[in-house]
Amino acid sequence: MGTGELLGGVRMRAPEPAAATGPRPDPNDAAAAAAAVTLASPRRQALSLLAYPITGPLFALICIFVVFSLTTSTFMNAGNVSLIAQQSVVIGTLALGQTLIILVSGIDLADGAIMVLGTVVAGSIASHGDAALAMVLGFAACVVVSSINGLVIARFRLPPFIATLGMFTIIAAAARLYSRSQSFPIASDLLSVLGSGPEFGTVTVTYGTTAWAALTLVLGYALNETGWGVHVYAIGNSPIAARLNGVNVTRVVFSVYALAGVFYAFAAWQALGRTPIADPSGYQIANLDSITAVVIGGTSLFGGRGGVAGTFIGTLIVVALKNGLTQAGIDSLYQQIATGVLVMLAVGADQYLGRGHRLGQGHQA
Amino acid sequence: MTQVFAVDPSRQMPGLAMQAIGLTKHYGHVVAMEGADFDLARGEILAVVGDNGAGKSTLIKALAGALTPDSGQVWLDGEPVRFASPLDARLAGIETVYQELAVAAQLDITQNMFLGRELRKPGVLGSVLRQLDKKRMRKQAAEQMHNLGIRVQSIRQAIETLSGGQRQAVAVARAAAWGRKVVILDEPTASLGVRETHQVLDLIHRVREHGISVVLISHSMPEVFAIADRIHIHRLGRRAAVVSPKTTVMSDVVAVMTGALPPQAVVSAALAPAGAPDL
């Protein structure tokens, strides 16, 4: 139907003067009336940047860089910065899929296991066969398993936490059974290509780093510029409201898990680029790391708030913090404590800001 | 055991926005609707009142496509219709505002207004890259808010930054924008304060002025008497009476609603003749 005309002047009468809205004694309304309906001004857009959810994570990342630049001599150089990027790609790519799922109020505890399955499937086939076929089947394994998660969660309404916890143990065991707990060294250039890339002195910009950034941009576009993206946020806000407005909630939630599987497949590819060995017992806490990156990046665990730009920064925060603490010679157990504190701060900030929004204080100019 | 009411086609009245005859709905042994009639004139505000459990919601759901009646017939603009889903009803020009549930709090006004009906950019950007035309949607949303005299600071405000009345106003504005024929409002003021209630009632008047028929489900008698052209009183799964607030006093409406007064005791304002047989 001609949606474009529906809201226009066709059926509607000429705009009434603003005064025709009846008595409004309240001072709040007087202020609102003065503003009336306006399209956002550039000034308002600039102000809304302050409320933009990635401001906090970005500030935290800058602080980490400043502190370690001052306290260590090795942190702030081009070689180490490119290393941080390379250390980020696996969890960063995994966290993109995780972001998508958390945005629809879900959670995926199986993402790391699915990724490992992808590496093992690809590695085993490549060890005595065609690398391209190995790649295709590795991708397929990730997408199929994540789609099964999507099916049981979207269609059969299992709670995401339970469904993916079950899938986590199933897939972790299945990957070991399939590989007979063997590791597969990767000889194929295709499978390990993301670990290489052009070198500029001490700096290596790997294809994996570029791919991570590109995937972030593509997903950011899908979330911010398409109707599907609006529906993802709407479902995270209120599945009932989304459904009542004609959004096919089951289909969108399923598509979210299926698409997350594509990102897990890319993460598997990234993992083979980082360490050219497909190990069924690797990346055991990658699921928690990916959730940490998403939460620190400002995406709300309640769904509907956040995005991939935050996750990109959140991943860098986690990795840069670990990297910096290592450079400073601090025990890795303290690194874990620091990450835990950061998660709690991030969730606390989410709660605090969320409350501010609900009280309507977030957008006063 | 299900009693089926034959629908006499001669009872269909031309010129009504919406009409229903002999709607029934049974859930096992529970009778939710028992030969309910309904009529709605073009451009009127019809209030639907009834005690809890009288079957108002069932009637409204049948009209809005949220449930399919076991028997009976619905007409929209004189044409017989059968809705398999709320989407069918929406495509036919009937919009429903559900109490409190209908908006996504963290999306902005425009996104809520166009939720499920987003506009895409023309050309390749829209068809291949599926890019939204945010500018066009914002412009149209601003126009719609302006036409209905709803004031907000910005069309890009998240719903959660609005007051309860403003939120409900956005939901009503959305329904009015898309509902070409009928807007059904399910207790739109139930959670609002006095001043906000007045704003929403004002808004309902303006929606009607734009030529849209409004069905208002409400528990508040003063509100019903302030705004309705006619009052449909629902009792025991069917229409007990339709009265005009001008000729019937509030206490009589309540009496018919609760069964203290027989429907024959009030002056009927029904447009179509009543036809459900006595049980």
Image: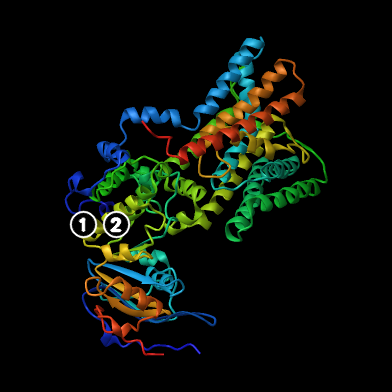
Residue at 44% in and 59% down: A244
Name the spot of residue B194 as percent of width and height, x first.
Answer: 34, 53
> Is the residue B24 above or below the residue A64 in the image?
below
Name the spot of residue A120 as percent of width and height, x first.
Answer: 73, 42
Letter of the chain that mark 2 sits on in the rendering: B
Same chain for marks 2 and 1? no
- Mark 1 is surrounded, within 10 Å at the Cα level, by few (under 14), some (14 to 19) or many (20 or more) other residues, namely some
> Is the residue A148 above or below the residue A306 in the image?
below
Q: Viewed as shown, does residue A349 lie left or right of A74?
A: left
Q: Viewed as shown, does residue B173 lie left or right of A64?
A: left
Q: How is the image coloured?
A: rainbow
Residue at 33% in and 66% down: B221
- Mark 2 is surrounded, within 10 Å at the Cα level, by few (under 14), some (14 to 19) or many (20 or more) other residues, namely some
Q: Which residue is mark 1?
A: A11
Q: Quadrant of the C terminus of chain B?
A: bottom left
Q: Is residue A61 visible?
A: yes
Q: Viewed as shown, does residue A308 lie left or right of B80?
A: right
Residue at 30% in and 71% down: B250
- Front-most of B124 and B4? B4
